[in-house]
Image (cartoon, grey):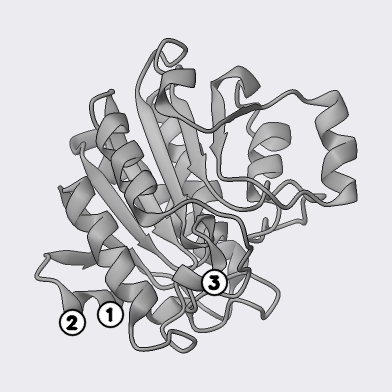
Amino acid sequence: MKFFGISFVNGLGLTKGCEKTPKTIKKLIKINLKKIKTDRFNIKKSLESIYKEAKKILEKDEDILFLGGDHSISFPLVAAFLEKFPDGVLIVFDAHMDCMSPMKEPTNEEWLRALIEKEKINKEKIFLFGVRKIYREEKIFLKKNKLNFFNSFSEIKNKIRGPVYLSVDIDVFDAPLVPGTFYREKGGPSLGKVLNLIKKIKQLDLKAADLVEINPEKDLNFETLRLAVKIIETLK
């Protein structure tokens, strides 16, 4: 697996600190982590840079992990993935839908809706795991846009056809497991369940993945970071 760090956040100030994750993870696990350059003072330029660099990477490599950063990086990453693989499938692990009304430069709260509305991703090829917090605006969006929610691999294994992109938001886990993230939600899955699911998804045509929303500044005793390392080792 090849690793790329993206030290970028666009979470309206709430995800500040997540940009430190790539550098911190590199201290905890021996990986060759290349850096995708961004400009923290220019959101538009940064998103464009992530998109362009991801396109280049996907043209020559597979089995890739992009390490964020917050979930806003998934907008340009998945857009680049879908350009390379128009029949691609998106699997998202997240406690939230991330389908609020899109802003001009998508943040971590509406990147998925921006993909649906701006990039015209096939909604039948989006699969969401772990979602348990849906805001009123998102419920309205759901009435017009049917998305696939699942709780076990058996529910999706016969539905997924084509190259796969996996996006893992660390807040998918039950709140006590991940002190090092801002948007924690109770009632999430255990580490064992998530790792087992990742192992099964690896059996599909998994081309690329991202891991986001880890905040070293908030992490208690490196609990969240150690959990992130286990995810990385499972993906390797």
User: At 49% across and 86% down in the image, what residue appears?
Assistant: 218
User: To which residue does mark 3 refer?
Assistant: 9
Label 3: few (<14), some or many (≥20) within 10 Å? many
Q: Is residue 47 left or right of residue 160?
A: right
Disc 3 versus disc 1: distance between alpha carbons?
A: 14 Å
Dot 1 amino acid type: Lys
Dot 3 amino acid type: Val
Secondary structure type for disc 3:
loop
Q: Quadrant of residue 162?
A: top left
Label 1: few (<14), some or many (≥20) within 10 Å? some
Q: Are marks 3 and 1 in contact (CB under 8 Å)?
A: no
Give residue 140's position: percent from left, percent from top. 90, 37
Secondary structure type for disc 2:
helix
Frontmost residue, 184 versus 5: 184
Q: Is residue 113 left or right of residue 1?
A: right
Frontmost residue, 95 versus 79: 95
> Between disc 3 and disc 2, whose residue precedes?
3
Which of discs 1 and 2 lies nearer the camera? The answer is 2
User: To which residue does mark 1 refer?
Assistant: 23
User: To which residue does mark 2 refer?
Assistant: 27
User: At 18% across and 78% down in the image, what residue appears?
Assistant: 28
Give residue 2's position: percent from left, percent from top. 17, 51
> Between disc 3 and disc 1, whose residue precedes?
3
Which of discs 3 and 2 lies nearer the camera? The answer is 2
Give residue 86's position: percent from left, percent from top. 46, 20
User: At 32% across and 50% down in the image, what residue appears?
Assistant: 192
Give residue 38's position: percent from left, percent from top. 44, 70
Query: From what the image shows, is residue 231 above or below residue 139?
Result: below
Q: Is residue 194 left or right of residue 151?
A: left
Query: From what the image shows, is residue 154 above or below residue 41?
Result: above
Q: Is residue 213 left or right of residue 145?
A: left
Dot 2 amino acid type: Lys
